[in-house]
Amino acid sequence: MKKNILIAIFLLFSAFALNSFASTPAVETPTEEKQPYHSKTMGELVDSFYATTGIKALFEPQVGVLDSHGKEMTFFAQGYGRIIMIFICFLLFYLAIKKGFEPLLLIPIGFGGLLANIPIANMAGPDGMLGIIYSMGITNQFFPLLIFMGVGAMTDFGPLLANPKTALLGGAAQFGIFGSLVGAVLLAQFVPGINFTLEQAAAISIIGGADGPTSIFVASKLAPELLGAIAVAAYSYMALVPLIQPPIMRVLTTQNERKIKMSTLRKVSKLEKIVFPLVVLSLTLLILPDAAPLIGALCFGNFARESGVVDRLSDTMQNALINIVTIFLGLGVGSKLASEQFLVAETLGIMAIGLLAFAAGTAMGVIMAKIMNLVSSKESQINPLIGAAGVSAVPMAARVVSKEGQLYDKSNILLMHAMGPNVAGVIGSAVAAGVLLSIFK
């Protein structure tokens, strides 16, 4: 009986449903009409193929061609601009492979730039491979935080703790950040065609610390429209540290100063190393919460390293994680080397400001070391070269300092001494970023 009732109810509902479906007018979905294929002659087939080649796109620019952001491209950007950028990418490959200038950065950035300048493919567009990479980790600041986590896991803060006064060198090198802030404002006032707002100038200024992740983090908050140009400038100068810094160091120091040997650093206890990231994070929490994402990621990576009980996590952050993120970050930054975005007045202005700011930061670190020597005893003299490591390009700047010192005295090992101001520079640039972000809240 119950079974028959259930069957009857089911049939009743089915009848109502069919009636309702029949009375509802069908909604037609628009479909694109497929054009019937017309047979072509051999000449027409050759012309059709030629129209899809990069040769035609480069040497026969057309009106109405759109870039990855949907804006119309100039004839120059379509043709000679792309060719210039392709040669620039080849130059990056040369510097990475032949000269050994930070290949981990320059090869992915250069290859991303090469892919971004391939016509027709639109790989830097929203649906292209590079565009997807850029939107999934750079525009939302995710990749920079992961990089800071990996840097924290790879960094030994022992040299800074063993010789705390070298933190002053890292602080002095941040002059490049605030100097470039002034430079960007002046450039906007006196150069026609460049109109940086104060927020944009602040975002540009972080390039002076030679800190790519921090530059991306600040730019995405204060000037997202300049994020691509700022990221390219910051990572370019990070990679070119071995080319930019040595001439500045030589101009500002004497040969005798470059030969100064520093005393052996004291051994730092494990407890000091464990407590240090917690102290730094606590001070950030109390004084500058705006810097918490960067400082927090750095301190977490370092705390995992120094705790000694999560070696698997620390190893992952130091190797697999940071390697994967470096690939994505490099390709994403390289996508902004597209001719229509790079070969414009504002981007070139940002590159110029970044170079001057980076040079100023390097110079101030060296000058601060010389000033400290004036008030120090002969036994505690600092080799002024290590002041150049105050920029936060870690550990590149420290390696450059060590190499420069050994040119004048092969027995003078400066690497560990240079790591003190180098890691102080990482913290200093994150603090400077927090200060700038707090100003514009």
Image: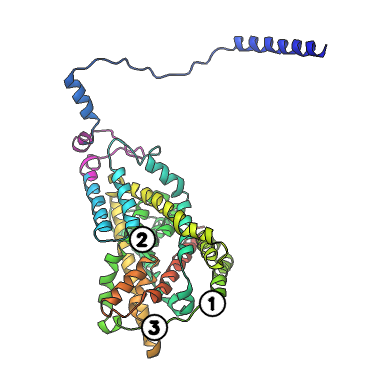
Residue 134, image x, y percentages: 41, 46
Which residue type does callout 3 highlight?
Met
Q: CA distance from mark 3 to mark 2?
A: 32 Å
Q: Which mark is residue 372?
A: 3
The residue carrying mark 2 is 185
- Magenta stretch bounds: 55-82
Q: Which of labels 3 and 2 is toward the front?
A: 3
Quadrant containing the N terminus is: top right
Q: Which of labels 2 and 1 is toward the front?
A: 1
Give the class, few, some or many, for how many residues have Cα within 10 Å of label 3's Cα (few <14, many ≥20): some
Q: Residue at x 36, y 55 (%)?
A: 230
Q: Secondary structure at mark 1?
A: loop
Give the class, few, some or many, for how many residues have Cα within 10 Å of label 1's Cα (few <14, many ≥20): few
Q: CA distance from mark 1 to mark 3?
A: 27 Å
Residue 124, image x, y percentages: 35, 42
Residue 282, image x, y percentages: 58, 68
* Drawn side of residue 152 relative to residue 263, left or right: right
Tell which circle, 2 or 1, labels the residue nearer the N-terminal end.
2
Which residue type does callout 1 highlight?
Ser
